[in-house]
Amino acid sequence: MKSRSRAAVLSAAVLLAALTGAPEASAAPARAPRALPSVDMEAVVKAAQIDPRRPDSTLTPGAKASVLLVERALSDRHLLDKKWVDGYFGTMTVDAFAKYQKSLGYTGLGANGLPGKASLTKLGEGRFKVAHVITPGPRVHIGAFVINVRTQKMLAEAQRLLHRRLTLDQGSYNPGGDPTSAGTHDGGGVVDVDVKGMSAATRTSVARALRRVGFAAWVRNPSQGDWPWHIHAAAINDTDLSSQAQHQIGDYYLGENGLAGRGPDDGPKVTPIRTWEEYLRLVHPTRP
Ligand SMILES: [Zn+2]
């Protein structure tokens, strides 16, 4: 628009204000806030678990646009080389995100490279909004064990599906507690379920119910490690996951067993794989 016609429009607005008696200030249209694009936090966190484990450059479905926004923000802060701004949340992006979290003063699980609500929101200031926010919730004690509220709700739903109470052998936030767990229980979202007294069929049905509500869950037996029979379950998309547990979830999506040898998945197939939030939208379709 040329300046003369712009001036004409403005004076027309002022004139209109005078005619209608409205104060002049309200006659000029308020500048609309710039609409920011949205980052889908669920999609980004999922990609950050799967992509580092992929043997190829396949992108996580539904995540590309959001991952690109996050990667551009990291690159603009000189935390990620431009050549890695590609929509693939691989190890370079996880490392860059961890550096960003450390720059905010976070340590330990708070700098696990998995976008959390606070760090992602901060990264997005003036750049993007965060949609589909995931929160692990506060930590709660279950007997001798500690888990977070998100995990607690997931376990409660699995129990409801099974019509059976589940007992834990190990909880979350347990660094160095059980050396056979190789760090998977150091962070949030991870539990071991006691299978004492269960038949093989029951163990399988418990693992299936855990998978349905959004855990990567496997029946573990003594031939695989220095442990008794149990079910190891890691909550997909828990933003408090330790690095080792993040890898197990990536492996689960890729059809593997989550053990160091990366063997084939030996558990009951539940397809498609769903996170807890995806499960909730499935059973309560009216939820946002
Ligand atoms: Zn375990």
Image (spheres, rainbow, N blue to C red):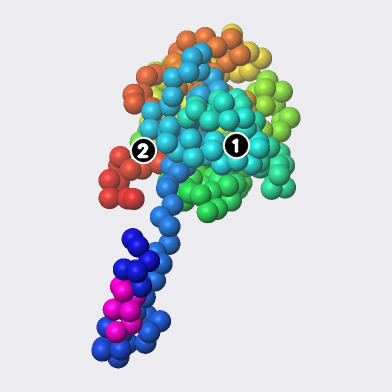
User: Element type at marker 2?
Assistant: helix
Residue at disc 2, CB closer than 8 Å to ligand 1: no
- 212 sits left or right of 136 in the view: left
- Bin the neighbour count of mark 2 within 10 Å (Cα to Cα): few under 14, some 14-19, many 20 and up: some
- 105 sits left or right of 145 in the view: right
In the rendered view of the protein, which quadrant contains the N terminus? bottom left
Disc marking residue 279: 2
**Residue receiving disc 1:** 75
Is residue 10 highlighted in magenta?
yes
Mark 1 or 2, closer to the camera: 1
Which residues fall within the magenta stretch?
8-15
The CA span between labels 1 and 2 is: 34 Å
Answer with the quarter of the image where residue 183 lies.
top right
Q: Is residue 92 visible?
A: yes
- In depth, the one of 114 and 178 nearer the eye is 114
- Bin the neighbour count of mark 1 within 10 Å (Cα to Cα): few under 14, some 14-19, many 20 and up: some
Is residue 34 highlighted in magenta?
no
What amino acid does circle 2 point to? Answer: Tyr
What amino acid does circle 1 point to? Answer: Ser
Measured as percent of width and height from the top left, residue 18 is found at 30, 89
- In depth, the one of 148 and 89 nearer the eye is 89
Measured as percent of width and height from the top left, residue 105 is found at 72, 47
User: Element type at marker 1?
Assistant: helix
Query: Vertical placement of 74 versus 249: above or below?
Result: below
Measured as percent of width and height from the top left, residue 222 is found at 59, 12
Residue at disc 1, CB closer than 8 Å to ligand 1: no
- Of the two numbered discs 1 and 2 on the same chain, state the one appearing first in sequence: 1
Query: Vertical placement of 102 versus 260: above or below?
Result: below
Measured as percent of width and height from the top left, residue 287 is found at 32, 50
Residue at screen point 69% across, 48% down:
104
